Amino acid sequence: AEVVIVPDAATAGGLAADEIARLIRRDPGAVLGLATGSTPLAVYDALRSRLVGADVARVRGFALDEYVGLAPAHPQSYRSVITREVVEPLGLDPARVRIPDGSLEGIEHAGEDYERALVDAGGVDLQLLGIGTDGHIGFNEPGSSFASLTRVKTLTMQTREDNARFFDSVDDVPRHCITQGLGTILRARHLVLLAFGEGKAEAVAGAVEGPLTASLPGSAIQLHPHATVIVDDAAASALR
Ligand code: F6R
């Protein structure tokens, strides 16, 4: 991967946003791979000013993951988060932005349906990624196959604790999710992984320089011919 070390999240967000804005101006029907969590907020923030005057009516988006069993209207469902943080502020067409179906009714077919929708859209042009402190990308927790496709996974206790800040307590964090697989993510044409803060330093080092291992799912990015890693000094601190 190409590693870019920047002083802060705002600079990183600006770089990623520049890349996305260039893509959309080149191809107004571009397919964006969207991430949730805290990390990509800097990108979405910066993207607002970069897209002023751009035609975004045909931009498509696919989220990486969704909690299983959380009502879509729950403020922390990734459907709500993507609507609030991406679709509305950037003026995207909500009908062109897809989130995996985490409802219990749909769960049996949700993975297959999502894979088909991704293929029908022609694949993701640029996939934004964060990384978990346990090395997950998407919600592919340690042990995930590098060939995995969209499917239901169990969140680790580490991830549930990390995400408890979005809920009243860790007990309210769902135990399961539906996530694009590592194989799905690797099919995107450009991966842009961002990470900030000391807490991500080990995961970043493992993903960029460690052995290829399912124990650190982020290491899968080493298999990708066009991966960009944008980190602040703290998240870069364990790189050699
Ligand atoms: C979010 C996702 C996760 C997060 C990761 C880091 O859609 O797939 O992999 O990117 O958990 O989360 P933050 O950015 O909140 O530290």
Image: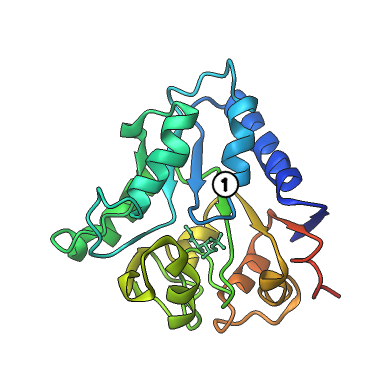
Tell me the colour scheme of the image: rainbow
Instruction: Check the image and name the residue furthest to the top.
Output: 53
Identified at 29% across, 61% down, the residue is 111
Q: How many marks?
A: 1
Q: x and y percent of residue 85 in the render?
A: 46, 41
Picture residue at 56% right of the left edge, 27% below the top: 27
- Which image quarter: residue 57? top left
Q: Cβ of disc 1 within 8 Å of ligand 1?
A: no
Q: Is residue 111 left or right of residue 49?
A: left
Residue 43 point in image, percent of width and height: 62, 43
Residue flagged by tag 1: what amino acid is it?
Leu
* Residue found at the far left of this picture: 105
- The answer to whether one can see residue 152 in this image is no
- 69 left or right, relative to 229: left
The x and y percentages for residue 180 are 41, 61
Q: Quadrant of the C terminus?
A: bottom right
Q: Can residue 30 be seen by looking at this rendering?
A: yes
The residue beneath circle 1 is 41
